[in-house]
Amino acid sequence: MRWGFVLDQDACIGCHACTVGCKQENDVPLGAFRTWVKWIEHGQFPETRRAAAVLRCNHCEDAPCVEICPTVALHKRTDGIVDLDRDRCIGCASCMQACPYDAIHIDPREGTAAKCHFCAHRLEVDLAPACVAVCPEQAIKVVDLDDPAIRAELRDRKALVRKPERGTKPQTFYLGADPAALDPLAVDGSRTLSHAEVPDPLPAFGTKEARAVYDVPKPRLWGGHISAYMVTKAIAAGALLCAAASAWSDNLDGPLCGVLSLAFTAVTLLLLVGDLGQPRRFWFLLTKPNTRSWLVRGGWILTAHALLSLPWLVTESAALAILCIPVALATAVYTAFLFRQARGRELWSEDRLLPFHLGAQALAAASAIGWFLGEWSVLWLALHAAIVVAHALWPQPTPGARAGHHLMLKDPLYGLGVAFALGAILLPPLSILSFACLDHAYVKAGQEVPLS
């Protein structure tokens, strides 16, 4: 048996009973939603029409939230339900970035993730999920997707799923839904709601095919901690490269660069831990790891980076220097693979230049550090500037990625970052300022494209 939802939007009256029933059954806090109703409108008065869509977790067959979760708090059950173990969750919010459907939130009381779990506690005692039980029109149905008759009916009635192009194989199906209600980019980006003049805080543009008149705004999840961590990580990687290069250079001070590398690695780890909803559970990354998650792999790389920084406090070795180079570059680059796992954020997950961009940041940071010590390379700074320009001009493969890229280029900080990257060719320390501006604009823009 493999459970799935069928939402009949021809029967739905948009009454929000499912939202209220879910909140009551699962003690969902104010301002958070496991299921919600979105209303859109087409046309201009008096020729208008309204459509509703019930939005929630899709219990995907290929669930990106399960893949990225670093502690296996999110897992897929044998009956197809994507469930969450709050006792393992560290509140990193990576699952929220991976979900293309905005179906996960952080519970402000617990600091852990929360989502629809199909009311599994009710199913296990032969009761329908709360949303099904309260729907006055029986517009929400629980079905066994292993039943050939169900699959045939869904096929015959041309059931839709949300964002099939993201490859997650959603297990929540819509009958009679307005496609614009399921596509957030089909909605006018002003997103002014009918019940209040409160614009959505995520100012992404839409195609203006429709307008949202009732919706649940979703705030940005990753902010200054993440962009700052990218900057400190680049500096740590650059310092370790300088420490390695000191084996062949008389100008570079290996022990000093080792101390710098270790210090910025420590700051990087503190920023990562400080951004967790449950920072005391940080050790779960080591004791309960999901080895597929690049959060876990990144933790291993940062640990190796810190350990390799220590020998430079006492000695210099050509063999050790050779080992430090790939570890330093891995420290710089692994975030690109973490962002690629964030499949909900298309600017990040579809970005094939990001590994080269982050690697070039490490080389530019090494040049900035070396400039103070009398040994630096204009070549690495020029390479960084060239990749920054290429990143700005690179064509984006999907509508969501194009929307995010457009917003990134509009950000004044991004333009300033490009200017600093070019100026760093003449004054290397400006490269650090370019990292700060570019990374902040990139992290912000990736989250400004609405997912629901």
Image (cartoon, rainbow, N blue to C red):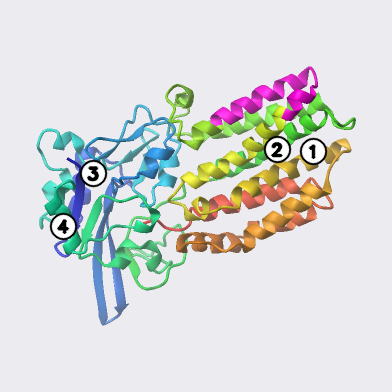
Identify the residue position indicated by label 4 in the image.
Answer: 152
Identify the residue position indicated by label 3 in the image.
Answer: 23
Q: Earlier in the sequence, mark 4 or mark 1?
A: 4
Q: Earlier in the sequence, mark 4 or mark 3?
A: 3
Q: Earlier in the sequence, mark 1 or mark 3?
A: 3
Marks 1/3: CA–CA distance: 53 Å
Residue 105, position in %: x, y? 37, 43
Whether 323 is drawn above or below 222: the answer is above
Identify the residue position indicated by label 2 in the image.
Answer: 235
At label 3, the amino acid type is Lys
Q: Are marks 1 and 2 in contact (CB under 8 Å)?
A: yes
Which of 39 and 195 lies nearest the eye of the viewer?
39
Whether 92 is drawn above or below 340: the answer is above
For mark 4, does the 10 Å Cα neighbourhood hold few (<14), some (14 to 19), or many (20 or more) residues?
Answer: few
State the residue at coordinates (31%, 51%): 169
State the residue at coordinates (42%, 62%): 199
For mark 3, does the 10 Å Cα neighbourhood hold few (<14), some (14 to 19), or many (20 or more) residues?
Answer: some
Whether 430 is drawn above or below 265: the answer is below
In the drawing, does residue 242 fall left or right of residue 265?
Answer: right
Identify the residue position indicated by label 1 in the image.
Answer: 369
SS for callout 3: helix
Q: Are marks 4 and 3 in contact (CB under 8 Å)?
A: no
Marks 2/4: CA–CA distance: 56 Å
